[in-house]
Amino acid sequence: MIKRYTPLQLLIHIGAWIPIARLVFEAFTGGLTANPIQHIEQRTGRAAITLLFLSLAATPLNSLFGWKEPLQRRRALGLYAFMYATIHVIIFTDLDYGLAWSLILETVFQKPYILVGAAAFLLLIPLAITSFDIWKVRLKKNWKRLHQTVYFIAPLVVLHYAWGKKGTFFALQGDILLPLIYGLILVLLMVLRIPAVRRFLASARTRWRRPVNSRNPAI
């Protein structure tokens, strides 16, 4: 029996594979730019950040619109984000540095943005491993505490991205437009998760629905 997928599920699964499909297409058509390794690193890094932020958007979407399905798709989005983060790290360690671990460690500690990125990736690993339902049962209340570390990981990811760009993020100079956009989105997502804000949005949504329902009484 073929499992039926919702439109949102299809959109998530198809959309999550588009960055890889584009990279494969560019590899066969010579579109990986003059620095293909850096191009792949940047593309997979942006895909990881985007998917991670989409997973963080599930709760705000529920608070704003009462849309419950995104809550059911957070795991898929989070795992896809981890997949791209893993590819990003493999490209860096293997293709970029040829698995020369002494040189990799030296580079990590010489360049703070790589150290921040490495910390974010290491923190993502236990979240990916324990994302399945069996771990909710085993860890009980600790499962939620563990997965709340994503609120610490997300700023690290944005800092890693911004710090690695050619520009000064805090002085708003250079190539910082995309990191700035991601930073603003993160701030918005975090504000929308504040309990008082969520209660206000839920109350506003209820008040909005009442006049709509009164204008459209059931026949």
Image (cartoon, grey):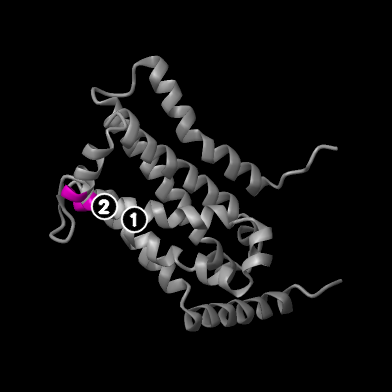
Residue drawn 59% across the image and 50% down it: 76
The x, y position of residue 6, in whole percent, is 71, 47
Residue 179 seen in this snapshot: no
- Residue type at mark 2 is Leu
Tell me which corner region of the image, top left, top right, bottom left or bottom right, holds residue 87.
top left
Tell me which corner region of the image, top left, top right, bottom left or bottom right, holds residue 219.
bottom right
Mark 1 surroundings: few (<14), some (14-19) or many (≥20) residues within 10 A: some
Mark 2 surroundings: few (<14), some (14-19) or many (≥20) residues within 10 A: some
On screen, residue 20 versus residue 95, left or right, reads: right
Task: From the image, give the main secondary structure of the stretch colored magenta.
Answer: helix
On screen, residue 7 versus residue 83, left or right, reads: right
Residue 192's mark?
none
The x, y position of residue 171, in whole percent, is 12, 60
Q: Quadrant of the N terminus?
A: top right
The x, y position of residue 89, in whole percent, is 37, 40
Per the image, the residue denoted by label 1 is: 119
Query: Which type of secondary structure does the marked residue at label 1 adopt?
Result: helix
Disc 1 vs disc 2: Cβ atoms closer than 8 Å? yes
Residue 111: say if magenta.
yes
- Residue type at mark 1 is Ala
Foreground pick, 111 / 184 = 111
Query: Which type of secondary structure does the marked residue at label 2 adopt?
Result: helix
What are the residue bounds of the magenta stretch? 109-113
Residue 115's mark?
2
C-alpha span from label 1 to label 2: 6 Å
